[in-house]
Amino acid sequence: MAITHPSFGTLDDNRIIFFDTTLRDGEQSPGFSMNLEEKLRMAEALAELGVDVMEAGFAIASPGDFESVQSIARKFAKDGPVVASLSRANAADINASGEALKPAARKRVHIVLATSDLHMRVKLRMSREEVLEAITRSVTLGRSHSDDVEWSAEDGSRTDPDFLCRCVEAAIKAGATTINIPDTVGYSLPEDMARIFRDLRNRVPGIEKVVLSAHNHNDLGMAVANTVAAIQAGVRQIESTINGIGERAGNASLEEVAMALRTRHDALPFRTGITSERILKTSRLLATITGFDVQPNKAIVGRNAFAHESGIHQDGVLKDASTYEIMTPESVGWSTNSLVLGKHSGRAAFRDKLRALGYGELGDNALNDAFRRFKDIADRKKVVYDEDVAALVDDEVVRGNDRVKLTGLNVSTGLGTKPMASVTLEVDGQRQDGMASGDGAVDATFIAIRQAFPHEVGLKLYAVQSVTGGTDAQARVTVRLEEHGKLVDGQGSDTDTIVASARAYVHALNKLLAKRERTAPPEMQATALSA
Ligand SMILES: CC(=O)SCCNC(=O)CCNC(=O)[C@H](O)C(C)(C)COP(=O)(O)OP(=O)(O)OC[C@H]1O[C@@H](n2cnc3c(N)ncnc32)[C@H](O)[C@@H]1OP(=O)(O)O
Ligand SMILES: CC(C)C(=O)C(=O)O
Ligand SMILES: [Mg+2]
């Protein structure tokens, strides 16, 4: 049934109001305080995102909070979301909220008072009757500042159901237009949520005239599930924060609730004002402002939310993304999904990456060889970057027709010991071994190569470059050899610098042999094939 609300006019039964409390409950996360300028930037982003109500702060908390609420109220003096300020159930808090909110085009005084026996006895030291009187008094005062008053039963989910009904009835009678039942300590299960709201809807006179609201905390990781259960039980306002920040384990995350509603429209046929394409941008702004990134596996906005590493999934996604994506990355602001290459990846994703890197189609043999080396690297490296793939494919491609192949390498070196290297080559299909000591591991390796495959050349350049960062990065080595004034460069890459060096040397050697073959007079070409 439609409700007439002072801030929203006629509200259809399928419209969900998003009450954002990033700037109030969210800011209560340790280390997440924001200054005025940061709050104003966030407020703008939240308005663009399409939140209906923005809790700008707790006006009485500090002069800075008062100023933030007032500045945000000024920012939305003509239009924009309803601006709210939290207040305890006392005159000073409510008057501070009322004063700070004055400039806003639409304002909401939010009043909270705990109703559970535990909170009333231990914290407030108030009896049930005193709490009921305070509700009536405070909501009445709230209405003198705005027609839009929200009353919240702190620790409502642990409140005696009969007493909760009496409190809600008192708040409605005094003029509250939104009734919020917070699961303040994140204790509820979804079925508890549903029961609480169904109970209120069945038992409290006048409940049909107000908007029911849920405010869930995430102590058991159920804030979003509880919020969805509340909606299914008739709640039409949900309170949430960007990235799920908030007191302790946080609040229900706005992006998760919004996308649950959009993605599961079949089961949750509701409308919202959220422009979901702005979600990622807003999430990132908050992370930048607070200095706290979301965890990689965070739903919707974590960097892995649309990333696939395992081969079976990557193959499925390449065939049709809906095999493993229940919403499109674009629908929440990502430009695309990503297929991350790692040790769980398969040929389909590897081939796709090669195409993206401009290698076109490799033949089956070259692809299989490159893929085998890729798996080898992936076993050793946490992340296989595009540069790694390019380096190993370049390596594989240039090695296609090589006469000399490096098939074995063993190096021993250390402090106070003479470096030794033993090398196994395959030359025109024949195994040839060499063993040598040298001035360093690379020197010993190059001498051992010359033993396995005797030849006279000059080493003109030896250069090592890191393909990516980190101690597990691949090294790309360039070796320049000179023979009779002719220069050739060879390249090799590997996570092991000595292996990369040996590959580079052998590569240069092959180029030299190819050069000899091309330049030898026809009658000498057969002999040019030997060193
Ligand atoms: C569940 C929630 O998230 S509620 C919001 C929580 N957010 C905050 O607390 C952040 C802002 N808070 C503050 O800056 C401060 O706590 C202030 C300015 C509000 C109050 O500071 P102080 O006056 O020094 O009180 P203090 O914080 O130590 O204690 C809270 C007092 O409020 C009382 N109180 C708590 N809730 C309510 C309420 N809803 N209505 C009326 N009084 C309340 C407590 O009983 C206690 O009173 P007491 O000092 O007589 O025992
Ligand atoms: C102020 C209220 C709504 C609150 O944050 C809570 O109970 O968690
Ligand atoms: Mg809270």
Image: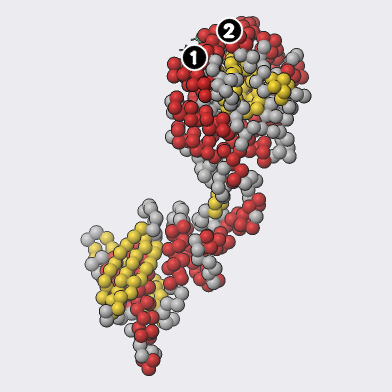
State yes or no: Cβ of the residue under disc 1 lies below 8 Å from any atom of ligand 1: yes
Amino acid found under the numbered disc labelled 1: Ile
Amino acid found under the numbered disc labelled 2: Met
Question: In the figure, 353 relative to 108: above or below?
Answer: below
Dividing the image into 4 quarters, which one contains the C terminus?
A: bottom left
The residue under the point 53% across, 63% down is: 355
**Image x and y of residue 37, in percent:** 44, 27
Mark 1 highlights which residue?
60
Question: In the figure, 197 relative to 274: above or below?
Answer: above
Dividing the image into 4 quarters, which one contains the N terminus?
A: top right
- In the rendered structure, the answer to whether residue 203 lies left or right of residue 312 reads right
**Image x and y of residue 292, in percent:** 46, 35
Q: Secondary structure at mark 1?
A: helix
Q: Disc 2 or 1, which lies upstream in sequence?
A: 1
Mark drawn on residue 126: 2
Nearer the observer: mark 2 or 1; the answer is: 1
Q: Secondary structure at mark 2?
A: loop
State yes or no: Cβ of the residue under disc 2 lies below 8 Å from any atom of ligand 1: no
